[in-house]
Image (tube, rainbow, N blue to C red):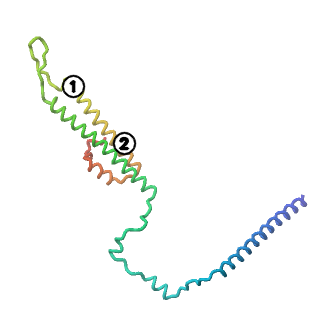
């Protein structure tokens, strides 16, 4: 057993020393190549003095005109900022769609108010006898009222979903408030 252990130790030592020898040869070759490269360089390198360093360490003060110059490379945005911007854009698109639906809702409300609210119309029931019936109970008005309710419910649901998506994208509350105000959907009518 001791012979096997000794043989294994000798094998490891030989493998390590042969690897070190190969590395030493490659480092020697690399040093020789670098010496040749330096001899081939004909142009002298610049030597810096203390005067050069002092002159460069005191740059001219930044003036308002220099500060206003655009950067050659704008700063990169983080992934989180990109997600937030995308969320704000998606929120605004959703609010635009809901604003169009709100316009349709307002048109339907006007139609209902004009045709059904506080009006009655004559209806022929028996023979030549006219009976006045309140328009709000007519099937057309009931259908119009159900359309108004479903439109309002759709806008409310859409706003809740858009607000939740904006929250998940970490859109700033001020951005959400400004977008809602811009499209006149900032009232509490469109929230839970």
- Between the C-alphas of marks 2 and 1, the distance is 31 Å
Rendering coords of residue 169 (x, y %): 41, 50
Q: Which mark is residue 65?
A: none
Q: Residue at x 22, y 38 (%)?
A: 106
Nearest the camera: 123 or 44? 44
Please tell me whether mark 1 sits on a helix, a strand or a loop: helix
190 left or right, relative to 161: left
Q: Is residue 133 above or below residue 87?
A: above
Q: Which residue is drawn at 42% across and 56% down?
A: 81
| Count of numbered tags | 2
Is the residue marked by circle 2 packed among few (<14), some (14-19), or many (20+) residues within 10 Å?
A: some
Please tell me whether mark 2 sits on a helix, a strand or a loop: helix
Q: Residue at x 91, y 60 (%)?
A: 3
Is the residue marked by circle 1 packed among few (<14), some (14-19), or many (20+) residues within 10 Å?
A: some
Q: In this view, does 84 lie above or below 19?
A: above
Rendering coords of residue 142 (x, y %): 22, 26
Q: Which residue lies furthest to the top in this view?
A: 127
Q: Which residue is drawn at 34% across and 40% down?
A: 158
Q: Which of marks 2 and 1 is nearer the N terminus?
A: 1
Q: Is residue 175 above or below residue 112?
A: below
Q: Quadrant of the N terminus?
A: bottom right
Residue 35: name its quadrant.
Answer: bottom right
11 left or right, relative to 141: right
Nearest the camera: 119 or 173? 119
Nearest the camera: 166 or 107? 107
Q: In this view, does 141 lie above or below 169?
A: above
Frontmost of labels 2 and 1 is: 1
117 left or right, relative to 73: left
Rendering coords of residue 27 (x, y %): 72, 73
Residue 110: name its quadrant.
Answer: top left
Reading the image, the residue beneath label 1 is 140
Reading the image, the residue beneath label 2 is 161
């Amino acid at each position: 057993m001791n012979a096997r252990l000794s043989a294994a130790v000798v094998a490891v030592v030989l493998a390590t020393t042969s690897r070190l020898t190969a590395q030493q040869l490659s480092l020697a070759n690399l040093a020789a190549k670098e010496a040749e490269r330096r001899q081939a360089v004909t142009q002298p390198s610049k030597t810096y003095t203390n005067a050069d360093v002092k002159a460069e360490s005191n740059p001219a003060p930044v003036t308002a005109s220099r500060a206003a110059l655009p950067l050659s490379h704008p700063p990169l945005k983080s992934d989180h900022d990109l997600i937030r911007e995308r969320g704000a854009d998606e929120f605004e698109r959703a609010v635009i769609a809901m604003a169009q639906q709100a316009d349709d809702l307002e048109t339907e409300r006007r139609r209902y108010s004009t045709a059904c609210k506080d009006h009655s119309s004559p209806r022929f029931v028996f023979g030549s006898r006219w009976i006045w019936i309140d328009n709000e109970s007519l099937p057309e008005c009931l259908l119009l009222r159900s359309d108004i309710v479903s439109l309002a419910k759709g806008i409310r649901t859409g706003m809740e979903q858009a607000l939740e998506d904006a929250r998940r994208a970490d859109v700033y509350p001020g951005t959400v408030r400004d977008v809602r105000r811009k499209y006149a959907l900032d009232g509490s009518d469109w929230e839970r």
